[in-house]
Amino acid sequence: MSDLPDVSGLTIGILGGTGDQGKGLARRFAIAGQKVIIGSRNADRAQAAADELGNGVRGLDNSACATGSDIVIIAVPWDGHKATCESLKDDLAGKIVVDCVNPLGFDKQGAYALPVEEGSAAQQAAAILTESRVVGAFHHVSAVLLLDPDVAEIDLDVLVLGEDREATDTVQALAERIPGVRGIFGGRLRNAHQVEAFVANLISINRRYKAHAGIRLTDV
Amino acid sequence: MSDLPDVSGLTIGILGGTGDQGKGLARRFAIAGQKVIIGSRNADRAQAAADELGNGVRGLDNSACATGSDIVIIAVPWDGHKATCESLKDDLAGKIVVDCVNPLGFDKQGAYALPVEEGSAAQQAAAILTESRVVGAFHHVSAVLLLDPDVAEIDLDVLVLGEDREATDTVQALAERIPGVRGIFGGRLRNAHQVEAFVANLISINRRYKAHAGIRLTDV
C-alpha cells in the first residue's frame, strides 16, 4: 500500500457532481486538501453545488470540468452515462477517468442489476473513451456517509478496477485521501460488472440490517 | 443475529464433497459437531474422502446423500451443475438446497464470470429444483483456509441469498457454525450472479496481495 503515488497536487473533476454521490466525493476530497471541480451540464447548477460545499470547490460545465482536471470521475446517473461519455470524449483524452456508475433497476422487490451491452458501465466508458485510461472505483461508498458532517472516517475498502497499473495505483491513492478508506486493486475491467451490481446487494443488506453497509477485504 | 435458529441437530449433505470446497466445508461442519454426509457420483470415492476427514463424516452416493440430509450443499464443478440438479430433483424435494457454485472461466489474464442463461448458478438450481428451497451461500470461502488445520477461525462474512426467510436464516446459522464466520443476508436470488462472479475479483486480489481474501460487511 505504501508504494502508491502522491496525488495531493492533482485536480479532481467530478462529472455529475451535483448528485449526492458526486457531491459527497467532492466534499471529502476537498476537505482532504485536493483541488476539486464539480461539473454539470449547467454551469450555474455546478457553481451552486460548489458554493454549498465550500473548501475551495469550483463549479463549471462538464466540458470545462473535464479539461481542467487531472483525474475525472463520472458520477452521472446511468441513463445519462453513454451520452456523457460520447459528448466528452475529446475533453477526456489523455486523462484518468474513474467510473463509479452502478447500472441498477428498482421495483417493489428492491434493486437489481441492469444488463449492459458492453458488460458494465466501466467497460462502456472504456469502449467510448479510447484515448483515456478508464478505471472503475467508488461504487460502494455511501453518499449518505460522504455527506454526513458527523462522520469523520468511512469504514470501507474501495475496489479499483482497470487495465493500467499506474492508473489504478493513482486511483487507489485518491481513495485513500478519504479518512478510513483503503484503495484495493479489484481486478480487470471485465470483472467490473459484479462490483457495480453488488450495490443491489448492499441495498438489500442496508434494508435488512438498517445499516450503511460497505465492504472490507480480509487478509489484505 | 441472535435470532437465528439452532441448526446443531441437522444433517448436512455435501454433493461434490470430494472436491476441495466441499471437503473443506464438510471438515468445518463436522468439527463443529454437525452430522455430515459427503456425496459423490461414486460411493467409494465419497467414503474415501469421509475417511480422510474423520470426525464422524460419512460418504455415500449423491442420491443417498441428498435423501439422508436435512440441508444439502451443491459444491460440484460448474460444468456438472445442471446435470446434478436435474438428476437429484426428486431426492432434493422438500429440502433446503445451498448452492455455492461459481461459474467462472480462466485464461491467461485470470478468472472471469461465465454467462449463465438463468442469471446465476443459484437461479439455475432454483429453476430446476422447484420443490426445494434454494439458497446461495459459501461462495467466497477459501477452500485452502477451510482445509488448513492451523487455521482455527475464518475471517469472513458468508453472504446468504434467497427468497425464503426461514431457509436463509437456517443457512446463516449454519455458516456461523464455522468459527469466525458471520452469516449475513445478501439479497434475493436475482442478485446472486454478482456474488458468484465476485470470486473472479477475489482471485485477482489474492494474486496481487498474496492473500486468501474474503469479505466483511461494515456497519452490520
Image (cartoon, coloured by chain):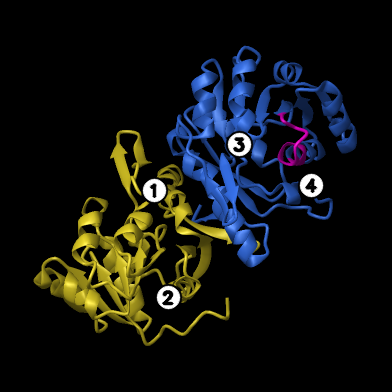
Chain colours: A blue, B yellow
Residue type pointed to by label 3: Val
The residue carrying mark 2 is B174
Question: CA gap, disc 2 to disc 3?
Answer: 35 Å
Kindly state the secondary structure of the residue where label 2 is placed. helix
Is A168 in front, or is A202? A202
Kindly state the secondary structure of the residue where label 4 is placed. helix
Kindly state the secondary structure of the residue where label 1 is placed. loop
In the figure, B145 relative to B46: above or below? above
The residue carrying mark 4 is A147
Asked if residue A85 is among those painted magenta in the image, a careful observer would answer no
The residue carrying mark 3 is A101
In the figure, A140 relative to B39: above or below? above
Question: CA gap, disc 4 to disc 2?
Answer: 38 Å
Residue A215 can be seen in this image: no
Kindly state the secondary structure of the residue where label 3 is placed. loop
Q: Of the residues under marks 2 and 1, which one precedes in the sequence? A: 1
- Say left or right for B162 vs B74: right
Chain containing the residue with disc 2: B
Chain containing the residue with disc 1: B
Question: CA gap, disc 2 to disc 1?
Answer: 25 Å
Which residues lie in the magenta part?
A: A15-24
Where residue A122 appears, x then y in whole percent? 53, 31
Question: CA gap, disc 3 to disc 4?
Answer: 18 Å
Residue type pointed to by label 4: Leu
Q: Residue at x 67, y 26 (%)?
A: A72
Circle 2 or circle 3, nearest the eye: 3
Q: Residue furthest bottom?
A: B9
**Circles 3 and 1: CB atoms closer than 8 Å:** no
Q: Indicate which disc residue B119 carries.
A: 1
Where residue B167 appears, x then y in whole percent? 44, 73
